[in-house]
Amino acid sequence: MRHLLSTRDLSRDEAIAILDVAEDMADVAHREVRKLPALRGKTVVNLFFEDSTRTRISFEAAAKRLSADVINFSAKGSSVSKGESLKDTAQTLAAIGADAVVIRHGASGAPRVLANSDWIDAAIVNAGDGTHEHPTQALLDAFTIRRRLHGADSRGHDLDGVSVAIVGDILHSRVARSNAWLLTTLGASITFVAPATLLPIGIENWPVEVRYDLDIALAAKPDVVMMLRIQGERMHAAFFPSAREYSRIWGLDDERLAMLAADSIVMHPGPMNRGLEISAAAADSPRSTVREQVANGVSIRMAVLYLTLSGEGGKQ
Amino acid sequence: MTETILVRAVTLADGTSSDILVRDGRIAELGRAIFASADRLIDGAGLIALPGLVDLHTHLREPGFEQSETIFSGSRAAAIGGFTAVHAMANTSPVADTAGVVEQVMSLGDRHGYVTVRPIGAVTRGLEGQHLSEIGAMANSRAKVRVFSDDGKCVSDALLMRRALEYVKTFGGVIAQHAQEPRLTEGAQMNESTLSGELGLAGWPAVAEEAIIARDVLLAKHVGARLHVCHLSTAGSVEVVRWAKARGIDVTAEVTPHHLLLTEQLAANYDSRYKVNPPLRRDEDVRAVREGLADGTIDIIATDHAPHPVEAKDCEWEAAAFGMVGLESALSVVQASVVDTGLLDWADIARVFSKTPAAIGQLAGYAQGIAVGAPASFTLYDPSVSRVFEATQLRGKGVNSPYLSTTLPGRIMATFHRGYATVLDGELVDAETVAAAARAHDQAGAGRG
């Protein structure tokens, strides 16, 4: 694997291979010395044009557990905030000798532009670009679902027959996009649940079902309910009238939590707005995978850095 | 003394073969085997002679944005593309909203001499959409401005648009509207479609164009004014204009070469060379604008030549500027999209890319095309060649062409502006020679007058 830009680029076998390597990486976390020498001498740059402490520290922990050298480059307070271009920043990182660039950027497609450019030839890992994709989030979600279903025997399994409801601001969510491609590639069926204002035009051409009504979607007893963070500023742009109305119609409250099948799980990419899209009881219930998702994120990012930097995946 | 030029055995737009004799800046004679002495003899075998192309929509960037283009560099890009006249959009700095700016733009064009530069005046002061600019002063200036546009921005306020249509009518002009409802296109990056949703790029919906065109044709009808629609890009817009024309509303419409050839699919890799406003649309829109051009719903082709410095495109999509250069490639793209596909013939091209845009811009000398007595502004085009289009074929300052490394048909071999050559043997005539020829033409004209 040369880069990881989009889950849409992954075949079923490639996706399972990443999840399986992540299983190996997860085992490292239980050793006395939680460190592998795999990427010794490699330099990983976390290039974050948007603040995201959670994703950055997850990548940082992943790179360090593989013995890579890590440089954190935050655009805030750097030359970037004084108007330096993506091109100049990339060329600077190339000159420093970065082997991999983990990029978080507010502009959709920025990682793809970097990968297609001749500015830098490092491996590019998309850590979230605009409203486009967040592939490592989807991979860690798939990993988490697989572990809940298959436990220690997860290796080699896909998600055939698993039903997933993704609820909330689909329009602006890179998590929803990456999951739509990845989970369907792995055999799961996806239902998006949102008001029409928060669904993209042309959604009928996506490989997903769409429902406006959360209660009808939950009545189908999905195996997985994934709640997306809702951002308060959306209501100012008339996507919905008020947080209270949104919460009442599309929030996972205690009553809806009680409707779920006994073995279904509740996911959230974080950070959560407790009491808005998800109730405290739902977030803290045994169904909730929120903390597992964070732990699994490190394993997935280890796998992705390992596969892009060790050369094992070959050229794409 | 101006040159006498004899073009032998060229094919005219109507398909007939003819010689063309140019003397004193005008077409002196047409016909087979003209017997005359000439300073310059050109073999027209295999070439099509088209009347000089007239672009109603060009961004020359001067004054103010000379790092992108100047009147000189843009004039050269136009000449190598077969143009003999361009209309320079008003979104310069300062904005072309006073007589002083438009006269300056016109005289710089005259001095360089490659093409006639007709300034377009801003509809509103500073393109701010608040107050009418000094339309009367610009219309009555030496530049005799007849086309007014806030292009780049839409005159979105309905009352202001109504007043502009009425006021311009007073001076025999026309409003060229950039149809883009601003609220529906806040932050817009590409055509709103399934693809924009997948790419996570904010959508520029077709309805934002169609709703403004629908409103404007109704306003034009109400006040009895002329309306010109810039760079129409959607199937729905074609339908609205067709509806308006069927009701006798005085509306004309233009389409760009890139909207005749390219689709939104090109945005898939976030290559910002394909970022343009209005955005590239769907296949069915491309088909609809081609058909609209063929059936006369769309009156003209105009380039919307929009040069930008390299750094404005060498970046992520959302940070990139809108626009593409188009003068140098225009006729080749038109050939590929509507001539080679059998929708239009070369006589149609002469109409939609020379005669009618000149009529809309009230530019004299183009009504008859290549005819005895008419000013000798024409271009010789070889439609049989095929070439890989490269940056080396661009003559303006901008290299933001969407066609680089693609194969395009045809090549301009010579261009004549008012009787003197601006392009010969497929290459620009040098600036001093062209400027001297332009001065000689003007002095001869003054002497005769």
Image (spheres, coloured by chain):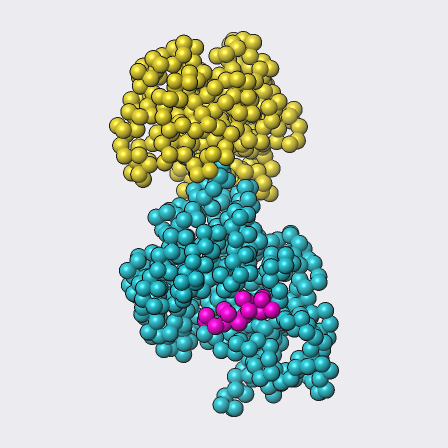
Magenta-colored segment: predominant secondary structure: helix
Chain A: colour as depicted: yellow
B47 with respect to A237 (left or right):
right
Is residue B356 found inside the magenta-colored segment of the image? yes
Q: Choose top left, top right, bottom left or bottom right for residue A158.
A: top right
What segment is highlighted magenta in the picture?
A: B347-361
Q: Choose top left, top right, bottom left or bottom right for residue A222.
A: top left
Is residue A250 found inside the magenta-colored segment of the image? no
A197 with respect to B117 (left or right):
left
**Residue under the point 47% across and 24% down:** A190
Residue closest to the eye, B136 or B398: B136
Percent x, y of residue B336: 63, 57
Q: Is residue B272 visible?
A: no
**Residue under the point 39% across and 57% down:** B213
Q: Number of callouts in the render?
A: 0
A121 with respect to A166 (left or right):
right
Which residue of the protein is positioned furthest toward the front in this rendering? B246
Percent x, y of residue A233: 31, 35
Q: Is residue B183 visible?
A: yes
B11 with respect to A239 (left or right):
right
**Residue under the point 56% across and 9% down:** A153
Percent x, y of residue A141: 48, 21
Say above or below: B142 vs B242: below
**Residue under the point 40% across and 79% down:** B142
Chain B: colour as depicted: cyan
The quarter of the image holding the N terminus of chain B is bottom right
Residue closest to the eye, A107 or B407: B407
Q: Choose top left, top right, bottom left or bottom right for residue B15.
A: bottom right
Percent x, y of residue A238: 31, 38
